[in-house]
Amino acid sequence: MAGGSLLMLLDDIASILDDVSVMTKTAASKTAGVLGDDLALNAQQVSGVVAKRELPVVWGVAKGSLVNKLILVPSALALDYFAPWAIHPLLMLGGAYLCYEGVEKLLHWFQHRRRKSSEEAKAELQSLESGALDEKAKIKGAIRTDFVLSAEIIVITLGVVTRDPETSFATKAIVLSAIGLVMTAGVYGLVACIVKLDDLGLFLSQKSGAARSIGRGILSAAPFFMKTLSVVGTAAMFLVGGQILVHGIPAVHHWIEHLLHGANGFVHFVATYLFNGVFGIALGAGVLTVLHPILKKFGH
């Protein structure tokens, strides 16, 4: 009897782990777009810090991110238990926020693409040289940004794990926790590598032979890499936000599927993402049009 109970327990554990594996992979793919923006934003947040303080700042933000997850994961589980009806509206709200923030970024780029004045550049240089940058303020700002994006990741993951009404509470808790930990380690591990890219390039450029060429290549490519990462992150906001909104509005989703009926796999895949992106841009622009006068009135 004891042996039979043990086998049943092991079978239950194996079943849970199998469900966790499948759901974690699905959730990871759904949240991958948000990660592009998360990565780009955090890499930019820690820029301007004295070289020897870059890794401590990244570590400080990473610890804050873990605290964010400790708040968000139990909150998501409580929401699922007490108010599951609120998950879909929150997903839609999160998708709309991503699209709005993406359009706001585009607007900012178009309106403020100008060179810094000599006074601004001089003030910034003096600030860097004197070490006057407030690390605590930088870390707090980055943690606030992380909270918003982490909330989006957790809500998207919650949407994945609640699709099957038979999913156990243990499975939901493990998947949410796993996604939170993996995403935090992955994002801030990469951020640490990115902020040290120039140091690696400088180190290699002082060597001889092929190492010197590689180092110079890294130093030349690093600024372009950061710009590309920022562009990819912004595009991901529209793709992810648009996908959430399209899937959340059955009429739009069915219209797109009907329009692409008969298209081959690759064309269907690309066209679907393009529709999601265009829909995200359009909706984000609409939200910005409504909110901009209000935010401007309150001095945003």
Image (spheres, rainbow, N blue to C red):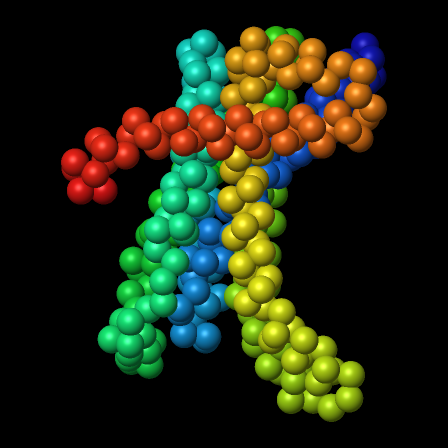
**Residue 130 as seen in the image, left or right of residue 242:** left
Give the total number of marks visible in the rendering.
Answer: 0
Say if 281 sits above or below 42 in the image.
above
Which corner quadrant of the image does residue 168 belong to?
Answer: top right
Which corner quadrant of the image does residue 135 belong to?
Answer: bottom left
- Which residue is at a point 60% across and 81% down the rendered structure image? 202
Which residue is nearer to you in this view: 48 or 117?
117
Residue 90 in view, yes or no: yes
- Which residue is at a point 43% across and 38% down the rendered structure image? 103
Which residue is nearer to you in this view: 161 or 277?
277
**Which x, y percent locates residue 7?**
81, 18
**Which x, y percent locates residue 123?**
26, 75
**Residue 137 as seen in the image, left or right of residue 20:** left
**Which x, y percent locates residue 153?**
52, 33
- Which residue is at a point 66% across and 34% down the rendered structure image? 29
Say if 92 sits above or below 98 in the image.
above
**Which x, y percent locates residue 255?**
62, 12
**Residue 26 as seen in the image, left or right of residue 138:** right
- Which residue is at a point 64% across and 16% down the rendered structure image? 256
Residue 73 in view, yes or no: no
Which part of the image, by quadrant, shows the C terminus?
A: top left
Which part of the image, by quadrant, shows the N terminus?
A: top right
